Amino acid sequence: GAGVSQSPSNKVTEKGKDVELRCDPISGHTALYWYRQSLGQGLEFLIYFQGNSAPDKSGLPSDRFSAERTGGSVSTLTIQRTQQEDSAVYLCASSFGLAVGGEQFFGPGTRLTVL
Amino acid sequence: AQRVTQPEKLLSVFKGAPVELKCNYSYSGSPELFWYVQYSRQRLQLLLRHISRESIKGFTADLNKGETSFHLKKPFAQEEDSAMYYCALKQTGANNLFFGTGTRLTVIP
């Protein structure tokens, strides 16, 4: 079956503009995650959705970042008033939820460049 | 607070040589640990998890709670092992992963 998909694959924007990144998880996966992969920083957890529970937003770096997940499926990560330090690859992953040893399946990522 | 440390950003070994990618963690609870791998132009994917005690593609990793380590090992490296390797930790009761900064492994033919 289809894996996690993300769009766009690349996004170039100007400083100060808002951007929206989309993630389509694997069908049936109740958990969805957003991570950021910056050069030299590894992967940084941003936000996590599990079913209908309130999302875990503890990794969001500032209030310019927000995310929502509609209908328990598609998720959108929004970055307002983008800054150059927001340039990174944004990865989405999904899984079956709380499962010991559970595997997360990653999308191809969206490369964001803020000029 | 939890932390995952991969001290080597780059590691090069010759084909057929043993390889060890180091991972240390700090976490007061009982962690779940994983190794994820990203081959060139491919997605990040799970390589192995400590709970399964499995060997995947010849790689093994043992959780050493005394040394708080989860090093990834393979006795004979192959060219196709060249990739970026990330060690990751999951806290008890949580689902998100905390990743190390990754080690880029290059296997020299």
Image (spheres, coloured by chain):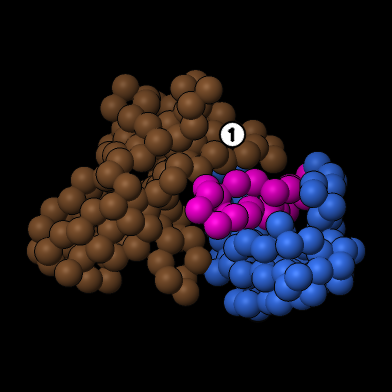
Residue B7 located left or right of residue B71:
left
Which chain is painted in brown?
Answer: A
Q: Is residue A15 part of the magenta span, yes or no?
A: no
Q: Residue at x 86, y 67 (%)?
A: B16
Q: Is residue B40 part of the magenta span, yes or no?
A: yes
Residue numbers of the magenta segment:
B30-51
Residue A99 located left or right of residue A42:
right
Q: Residue at x 87, y 63 (%)?
A: B76
Chain at numbered mark 1: A
The residue to which callout 1 is attached is: A98
- Three-letter residue code for mark 1: Leu
Above-or-below relation of A12 to A40: above
Quarter of the rendering occupied by the C terminus of chain A: bottom left
Above-or-below relation of B34 to B78: above
- Rendered hue of chain B is blue
Residue A95, image x, y percentages = 54, 34
Residue B73, image x, y percentages = 82, 63
Q: Which of the two residues, B91 or B88, is positioned nearer the viewer here?
A: B88
Residue B13, located in which quarter of the rendered image?
A: bottom right
Q: Which of the two residues, A64 or B79, is positioned nearer the viewer here?
A: B79
Q: Residue at x 81, y 42 (%)?
A: B52
Q: Extreme front residue here?
A: B109
Q: Residue at x 79, y 61 (%)?
A: B78
Crowding at label 1, few (<14), some or many (≥20) Cα neighbours within 10 Å? some
Residue B106, located in which quarter of the rendered image?
A: bottom right
Residue A6, image x, y percentages = 36, 40
In what element is the residue under mark 1? loop
Residue A91 seen from this side:
yes
Above-or-below relation of B62 to B24: above
